[in-house]
Structures are given as C-alpha cells and as structure tokens.
Image: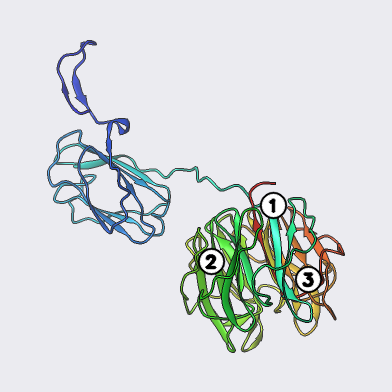
C-alpha cells in the first residue's frame, strides 16, 4: 500500500512506501521493444529478442514505486533503457541516457521529489544463476564400416559402452551431434550431403528422420550452448562453408547463419564454461587449421583465434570437469594421438601427446556429469576402442570391444539421471 497513515492501532504515522510484496505484478511477461510503466506495478522484462525501452509515468507522487526484473537473465545481451518522461532520474534530467545491461538484474525505483526524481532502492544482479543437472549418459551413433550404418551405442554414467542398437534413422556417416533441452540429444547432417536430423529422447531412443534442417553438408561439428540449446557449424557442401544452425531447447533446427569465421570442415566442437561452446581446428582451403571460434551463451560465434596447438582435422571434442573442454586425436598428414585442454574461459592449452591409439574420424562426448569419452575412429581400418577422460582432463589408455568397429560417427550426452 501507499499513502499517509494518520491513525492506526499502533498509534504510528508517516509515509509508507510500497513494498515489493505489495506491488501489483503484471501478469504478462513483457517481450516487446517498448513498455509504458505504471506506478505500483512490477514487471517481468524478457529481452531475449530485443532491447526494451521503458517509459516511466509523466507524473509521480512521493513513494510511488516500480520494479523491473530480468526474466530470462538476458539484459546483458539486450539491455533495458529508461525514459523518465520529463521527470528527473537520480537527480538528472531525462535528457540523460539511463540503461541497465547486466544479466539477472532487478531494478526497484521509488519517486522522491522534483529534485531527485526517481531513485533506485536497489539495482543489483542476482548472484544465483541456477544450472541444469549435469548430463549423465551418452550416445554414439551412425558411422562407416565399409558402408554407412545407422546403429547406436549407449554409454552409462560410469562410462561403460553398451552393445549395438540398430535401425536408428537413415544410415549415414560424417554427421555431428550435441545435447539440447538439458537431457536430450540431436544428430544432424551427414555425407551425401544431407540435411536431416534425428532427435534422441532422455531415455536414449533415437527418433525417425526430420528433413530440411538448413543447408545439406557433411563433416560439420556440434556442441551444446546456453545450457539447453545446441549449435551445428561449418562443414562441406562440395566446398568448405562457415555457416551455423542454432537448435532451440525443443530440438528445432533454425535456418542458416553465414559468415562465422574461416570456412572449414573436419572440425570439432565442445561445450565449456557451463553455457558456452568452442569450434576448433579443421581443414581449410589453405590446409590444416589450428583456428578456434568461441560461441557465446546466446549462440553468437566469434571471429578466429589462431595458433591453438597442432593444426589438424578429423579430430573430436567434448566437455569435461563441468566447465572445461578437450580436443583430441585427428590427422595432420598422419594419424595422431595428441589432445588439447580448454579452460573454463575458452583458452586452449598446448599439445599433450600419447593419449591412446593414434586415429582420426572418431567421436567424443561428456558423460557422468564431469567426465568425457573418445571412441571409435579409423587407424588403418575401423576401430571399436574407447578412451575415458577423467574430471581433471587425463585421457586413459585404450579400452577395446565397444560395439561394432566404425569411423566417421557422432556422439552426444543425454539424460540427467544416472
């Protein structure tokens, strides 16, 4: 409530400002580019798609209060702008620019008087940013045994690879996969080239083909970003490309976004920093590459970063340790067994050599909340071996006999249940 308290049971009087609990909270989430605010109201502001300009009342009384909340923690991407509509804001005329651009921020303002105008009671960001439960299980799928196959192999939360499951969509190779929706996965693209995808449920069941998901291509890479979305990037259509396709939290693949770094294929990708991703290495028109490209938590791909370990292609990447990543194996004219760790800020470390059998065209994924696994590949023939990666990024020796030997497959994490 607000107003002058003149008589009450406690014999107190004075001006009472509206408390946040007493506000009239707007029942609609504000997603538009403009909002005309009313005193005594609270608003949830969703700036996922655009900046929002908020016009305050042109007249106000002492104690009038308005609260704005960053509904999806996106003000850092698309800010809010306050138009004080002729009244002062923190003692400044409304000719001043007032913006708030911090993820998770809340803004609680109260009108004082004509001199100071609207004053923030608080404008802090919430330190708590809940994260989804970590991925526990994983799936390897598709590949090449001398012919294209459609089999898959599930991986338990302890890193044990199960026997083959057959008949999971169109047989193909040279595809990519990533987790989405916090507990599901998606396979996409492949040699042909094709543009189909196959969703994977949180129980590891692969769905029938979905066609028409962006430009057909092969040997792209994919990773999870933003905790519940995915991105496919780069690849070969007959020429090397630099396009990407975002995947939303319900598994829908978006149209092409072009011009995201140097065109290349045989690239790898992984999640890092809990909500971001990184593309790395690959074969470019100038030869083997050591380039990387960071991906923000809103799916924006950054320009090239050069010189991150030995140039190579046909490698693989995965998240480990909860917030870091690892690139491993590949080919630079011969098969190699090196790896490169990626910090939780996206910095790629120098080469580590001797991590299991040298090979190319393998796949990798996170599992067990903070570990990773590399598996399969080609080294003078298809392989069925795997190598576990500890929560500190140490690659273990070969484990053999993990399903049908094959190469040029893909893998992703799924399920938040162990």
Quick check: 346 above or below 39?
below
Real-space Cα separation, disc 2 to disc 1, in angstroms:
20 Å
Please name whichever residue, 57 or 367, is drawn nearer the observer in this view of the structure: 367
**Residue 350 in view:** no
Identify the image quadrant of residue 206: bottom right
Quick check: 122 above or below 77?
above
Q: Secondary structure at mark 3?
A: strand
Question: What residue is pinned by disc 3?
Answer: 338
Q: What residue do we see at 57% from left, 53% from top?
A: 182
Identify the image quadrant of residue 271: bottom right
How many callouts does the rendering have? 3
Identify the image quadrant of residue 77: bottom left
Please name whichever residue, 342 or 92, is drawn nearer the observer in this view of the structure: 342
Q: Earlier in the sequence, mark 2 or mark 3?
A: 2
Could you tell me residue 127's position as x and y percent?
Answer: 48, 43
Q: What residue do we see at 65% from left, 74% from top?
A: 170
Say which mark, if any, is on residue 295. 2
Q: Are marks 3 and 1 in contact (CB under 8 Å)?
A: no
Q: Earlier in the sequence, mark 3 or mark 1?
A: 3
**Residue 275 in view:** yes
Could you tell me residue 366's position as x and y percent?
Answer: 69, 58
Q: Are marks 2 and 3 in contact (CB under 8 Å)?
A: no
Q: Secondary structure at mark 1?
A: loop
Q: Residues within 10 Å of mark 2 (few under 14, many from 20)?
A: many
């Amino acid at each position: 409530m607000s107003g002058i308290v003149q008589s009450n049971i406690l014999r107190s009087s004075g001006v009472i400002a509206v408390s946040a609990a007493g506000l009239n909270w707007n029942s609609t989430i504000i997603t538009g580019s403009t909002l005309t605010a009313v005193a005594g109201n609270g608003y949830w502001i969703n700036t996922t798609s655009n900046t929002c300009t908020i016009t305050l009342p042109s007249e106000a009384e002492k104690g009038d209060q308005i609260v704005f909340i960053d509904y999806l923690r996106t003000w850092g991407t698309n800010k809010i702008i306050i138009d004080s509509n002729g009244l002062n804001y923190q003692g400044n005329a409304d000719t001043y620019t007032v913006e708030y651009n911090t993820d998770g921020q809340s803004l609680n303002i109260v009108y004082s008087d004509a001199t100071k105008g609207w004053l923030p009671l608080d404008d802090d960001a919430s330190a708590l940013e809940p994260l989804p439960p970590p991925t526990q299980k994983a799936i390897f799928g598709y590949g090449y045994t001398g012919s294209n196959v459609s089999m898959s192999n599930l991986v338990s939360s302890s890193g044990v690879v199960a026997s083959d499951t057959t008949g999971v969509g169109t047989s193909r190779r040279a595809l990519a996969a990533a987790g989405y929706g916090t507990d599901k996965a998606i396979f996409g693209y492949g040699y042909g080239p094709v543009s189909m995808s196959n969703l994977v449920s949180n129980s590891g069941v692969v769905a029938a083909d979905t066609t028409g998901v962006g430009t057909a291509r092969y040997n792209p890479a994919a990773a999870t970003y933003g905790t519940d979305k995915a991105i496919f990037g780069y690849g070969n259509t007959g020429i090397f490309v630099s396009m990407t396709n975002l995947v939303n939290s319900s598994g829908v693949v978006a149209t092409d976004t072009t011009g995201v770094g140097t065109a290349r294929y045989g690239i790898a990708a992984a999640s890092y920093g809990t909500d971001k991703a990184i593309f790395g290495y690959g074969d470019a028109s100038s030869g083997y590459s050591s380039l990387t490209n960071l991906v923000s938590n809103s799916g924006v791909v950054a320009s090239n970063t050069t010189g991150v370990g030995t140039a190579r292609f046909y490698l693989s990447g995965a998240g480990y340790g909860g917030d870091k990543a690892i690139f491993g194996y590949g080919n630079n004219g011969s098969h190699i067994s090196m790896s490169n760790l990626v910090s939780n800020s996206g910095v790629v470390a120098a080469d580590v050599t001797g991590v299991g059998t040298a090979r190319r065209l393998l796949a990798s994924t996170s599992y067990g909340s903070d570990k990773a696994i590399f598996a399969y590949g080609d080294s003078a023939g298809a392989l069925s071996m795997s190598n576990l990666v500890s929560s500190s990024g140490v690659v273990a020796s070969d484990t053999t006999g993990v399903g049908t030997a094959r190469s040029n497959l893909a893998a992703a994490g799924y399920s938040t249940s162990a």
